[in-house]
Image (cartoon, grey):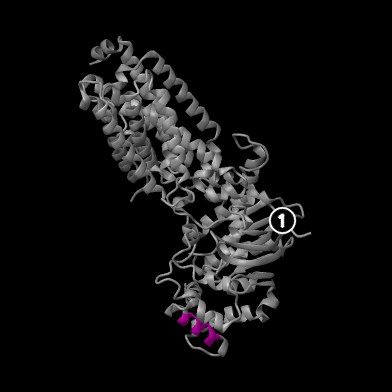
Amino acid sequence: MIDTLVYYFEFPFVRYALIVGVLIALCSSLLGVTLVLKRFSFIGDGLSHVAFGAIAIASVLNLSNDMFFVLPATVICAVLLLRTGQNTKIKGDAAVAMISVGALAVGYLLMNIFSTSANLSGDVCSTLFGSTSILTLSISEVWLCVVLSIAVVVIFVVFYNKIFAVTFDEDFAKAVGTNVNTYNLLIAVTIAIIIVLAMNLVGSLLISALVIFPALSAMRVFRSFKTVTICSAVVSVICATLGILISILAGTPVGSTIVVIDILAFFAACVAGRVRYGA
Amino acid sequence: MAQLSCKNLTLGYEGDVLVRDLSFEVNKGDYLCIVGENGSGKSTLMKTILNLRSPMSGTITTGDGVTAREIGYLPQQTIVQRDFPASVWEIVLSGCQARGKFHPFYTKEEKRMARENIERMGITEYTERCYRELSGGQQQRVLLARALCATRKILLLDEPVSGLDPKVTNDMYTLIEHLNKDEGVTIIMVSHDVQAAVRYATHILHVGTTIFFGTKEKYLQSREGRLFTASIESDENLTIKNPAQQDIRNESENIATGNVSASRKEKNDRNSQEAKKDSYDGDMSSDKQRENEQPKAGGLQNESGDVMHKAGEEAGK
């Protein structure tokens, strides 16, 4: 087994996949806690569908590097979605559902009409479930990924206390003079970046899993914001690493393997939580 | 100079005026209770004072060494907080966030202050505990400690005892009284509990169809005060003793039959805007406002009844 792994790791694309996978898992888990607690779990899902639509448009337009189109489009949608939390006619969850399903439909339609590839369903499937794209990363994409991940981690650490305050009690934070809107915007933009990054790893349908499972697992076992955040990062990185290794060895799709491991980790955490706190 | 003065405030939502021409002042060391029926604009007033929303007209000014950001705030619990994994320490510390320039981490000074306030609230032993595992009274103390980290001068409390049992409620009132009398913290409290308001407060602001602002003594003699306190007593006895209470009963019955504006206009010389405020049912689109208040089954049929019910409930606990 070790031999097989060593053999595979001689290929640069496998190493890239592991590096990128771990970084993405780390980033997505950090904000996961905030998203879950703010009741925004589905925003991740909605945004990933938006990203799917954006990818479809990019491929129709034959853009050489679709990241530069997909990223801004997703960021804009994230901002719009979080804005809807405040005074609009269509309330938060409905807005998310509307935008996400709409983007999915338009994306698929565009891909279907303007398809240049022979294997349409394969394309769609890999965009949705990320089956192969992580193994076809170019070195420039890897670097982009590394830079963005570092940016996300730095933003999170620097604004950690503010993010906590805004998540725990928005009204109080606002009343004592924290610029809540700015921080919500920051959270939205960061989520969008993470989503676009994570599309490479697990595909657009499974991103929410990457964002919420580690956070939920950590919340089962730990009782303070700091420990929950750290634990969720650790759980997420371990699950991603295991998932990637298993998928290499067993030849399973990367994204769904990682998510399955995350699910297992969640159940393990439930058990651990019960043991630790009784009941 | 007053620490907080509101002049000619008009409050409301998207064209629906809730409160018109409201003026009052809060001086250092005051203990002001804001009372009124559900939907009378108490929460809106509070949010306006805190700068969470702007008044439709009028001004709010702070003075006497208090800036607009130095009003400590004890909010009602939100749904998010009920299963939020955070330690008492983290929450109290987050009260220090808005001091001066941006710096990513808390300073030693801020940590010392947080520790002090935890001590003042008598919750030192829970410092490392998880917030959601604490009892209602302990949670309120945590939030109070957080509010004290944000200010030393003026505290705004939103229904600080809702959902607490009678003993804890008393403890909470004693604690607030201690802050007010012994530490000179100005208190502004939004409350349903008129009896406690009358017992502890120095000033009363009654918002509703008519507005009263003045000292507690004057409030008890005023028309609003007599009506409001009487309505609670009558609910407890379930008998109607005097014409003033009869008046209230009739009013709620009329509301129940739906002719809000008409009946009220006849009964009192209220102006049309106030009547409009009362008939907001259905077109007042702010969910936030409603979240803070009891659900009103069947619209407005129970405006004053609602208050009675709640006060009775709390007394009964």
Q: Does residue B95 appear to the left or right of B249 in the view shown?
A: right
Task: Return the residue nearer the eye: B24 or A170.
Answer: B24
- Res. A43 image quadrant: top left
Binning the other alpha carbons within 10 Å of mark 1 as few (below 14), some (14 to 19) or many (20 upward) gives some
Q: Is residue B251 magenta?
A: yes
- The amino acid pointed to by label 1 is Thr
Task: Return the residue nearer the eye: B146 or B51.
Answer: B51
**Residue at image location 27% in from the left, 32% down from the top:** A108
- Quarter of the image where the N terminus of chain B is located: bottom right
**Residue at image location 39% in from the left, 28% down from the top:** A196
Q: Residue furthest bottom?
A: B242
Q: Which residues are magenta?
A: B245-254
Q: Does residue B201 appear to the left or right of A184 in the view shown?
A: right
Q: Secondary structure at mark 1?
A: strand
Q: Chain of mark 1?
A: B
**Residue at image location 60% in from the left, 59% down from the top:** B46
Task: Return the residue nearer the eye: A221 or A153.
Answer: A153
The spot of residue A46 in percent (x, y) is: 36, 39
Location of mark 1 (residue)? B61
**Residue at image location 72% in from the left, 52% down from the top:** B66
